[in-house]
Image: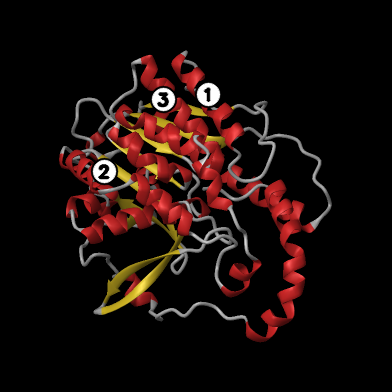
């Protein structure tokens, strides 16, 4: 979803530090990681899931690996890229809802989602009929349950402060066979839905072709579809990684996938395409980047403590990565005479008053995005 803020980390750490002291001696003598089936780099390089090739690609693969010709064949080509941002995903949901109300929301040729954007992406892809679903997820209060019951024991003996049971249940509640069938139908029409995860074993950005997964149409495909969505939103240390069954060179093993925002805070186009300097077939399109966070630099007097310094540093890294991708995409769009459209939370918008998924904050942020979009003020064609 996004790297937690300094305040979130600090408050959660304060609540758990007493428990950490009590169990630290036990941890030193008995702490162990969950067992995994070992596999090699060679096996990883040829791995595939569901015994099918092409269900995902990696962002650093050659341009020849990306077959987008069919996807860009429509007369009107629009690319929507949804960033990470945790609770700030309420902004993106508000923009989508307000855009629908304005009556000029496109049917996107390509939708990509990272982290919280990965949770939004399938519903944004399927169109305004799912606006109410997104509003429910981000404003009803259901998201608050994701960060209930932190446990230092999970950190010491598992791989995340919170279990991922609630995250998996949230995804399963809203993503069933009907969603899978609808995504498969749109995929057959040439539209493309992409969700990003980070493969920790290979340290690579995995771009999952959700339409192709949906087209498989089996219970295993639905399970994988849900797993990819959950993995894209699994913040390291906060939620455990999602283990995805794979096969390579005749051996079966599990890949470890976490939040896509670790390596790609937003996916506009694979780097191979950007470096190529053109789209396949010299196709033209409009690129919409919907950033679920603030991207303008801001001053903040940072406390000289380990937690605050680390948190501010991580936040700065993510912000710099996001700005770099936006600037590269802007330059790419201008050189190729493509439409460039950017939306983000303004610098002066009030920060969340509390940790995690504060419902009142998310409702207000949703309304802010909705009103901006409905009034035609959500998008800009200039850089911040």
**Res 268 visible:** no
Q: Which residue is mark 1?
A: 367
Q: Is residue 180 left or right of residue 274?
A: left
Callout 3–callout 1 Cβ contact below 8 Å? no
**Label 3, label 2: how many angstroms apart (C-alpha)?**
19 Å
Q: Residues within 10 Å of mark 3 (few under 14, many from 20)?
A: many
Query: Which residue ends up furthest to the top in the rendered image?
Result: 375
**Residue 128 location (% of width, % of height):** 32, 27
Quadrant of the snapshot with the C terminus: top right
Mark number, residue 186:
none
Residue 97: image tag:
3
Q: Which residue is mark 2?
A: 179
Which mark is first along the chain, 2 or 3?
Answer: 3
Residue 342 seen by the camera: yes
Residue 296 appears in which quarter of the rendering? top right
Residue 99, how many percent across, how many down? 40, 21
Q: Residue at x 41, y 37 (%)?
A: 81
The residue lying toward the viewer, choosing from 315 and 75, is 315
Q: Nearer the viewer, residue 16 or 285?
A: 16
Helix, strand or loop at label 3? It is helix
């Amino acid at each position: 979803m996004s790297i937690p803020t300094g305040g979130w980390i600090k408050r959660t750490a304060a609540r758990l530090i007493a428990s950490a002291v009590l169990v630290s001696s036990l941890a030193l003598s008995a702490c162990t990681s969950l067992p995994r089936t070992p596999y090699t780099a060679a096996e990883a390089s040829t791995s595939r899931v569901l015994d099918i090739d092409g269900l995902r690609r990696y962002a650093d693969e050659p341009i020849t690996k990306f077959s987008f010709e069919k996807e860009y064949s429509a007369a009107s080509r629009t690319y929507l890229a949804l960033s990470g941002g945790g609770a700030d995903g309420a902004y993106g949901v508000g923009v989508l809802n307000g855009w629908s109300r304005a009556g000029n929301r496109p049917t996107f040729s390509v939708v990509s989602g990272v982290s919280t954007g990965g949770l939004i992406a399938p519903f944004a892809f399927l169109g305004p009929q799912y606006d109410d679903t997104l509003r429910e997820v981000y404003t009803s209060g259901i998201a608050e349950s994701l960060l209930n019951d932190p446990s230092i024991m999970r950190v010491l003996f598992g791989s995340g402060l919170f279990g991922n049971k609630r995250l998996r249940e949230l995804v399963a509640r809203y993503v069933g066979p009907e969603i899978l069938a609808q995504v498969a139908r749109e995929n057959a029409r040439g539209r493309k839905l992409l969700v990003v995860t980070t493969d920790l074993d290979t340290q690579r950005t995995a771009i999952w072709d959700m339409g192709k997964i949906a087209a498989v149409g089996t219970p295993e495909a639905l399970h994988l579809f849900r797993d990819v969505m959950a993995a894209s939103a699994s913040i390291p240390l906060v939620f455990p990684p999602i283990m995805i069954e794979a096969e390579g060179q005749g051996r079966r093993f599990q890949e470890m996938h976490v939040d896509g925002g670790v390596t790609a805070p937003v996916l506009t186009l694979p780097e191979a395409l950007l470096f190529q300097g053109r789209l396949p077939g010299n196709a033209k399109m409009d690129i919409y980047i919907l950033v679920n966070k603030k991207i303008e630099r801001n001053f903040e007097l940072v406390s000289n403590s380990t937690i605050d310094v680390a948190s501010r540093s991580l936040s700065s890294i993510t912000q710099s990565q996001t700005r770099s991708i936006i600037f590269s995409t802007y330059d790419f769009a201008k050189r190729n005479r493509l439409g460039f459209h950017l939306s983000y939370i303004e610098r002066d918008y009030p920060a969340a008053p509390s940790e995690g998924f504060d419902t009142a904050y998310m409702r207000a942020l949703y309304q802010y995005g909705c009103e901006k979009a409905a009034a035609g003020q959500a998008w800009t064609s200039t850089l911040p």
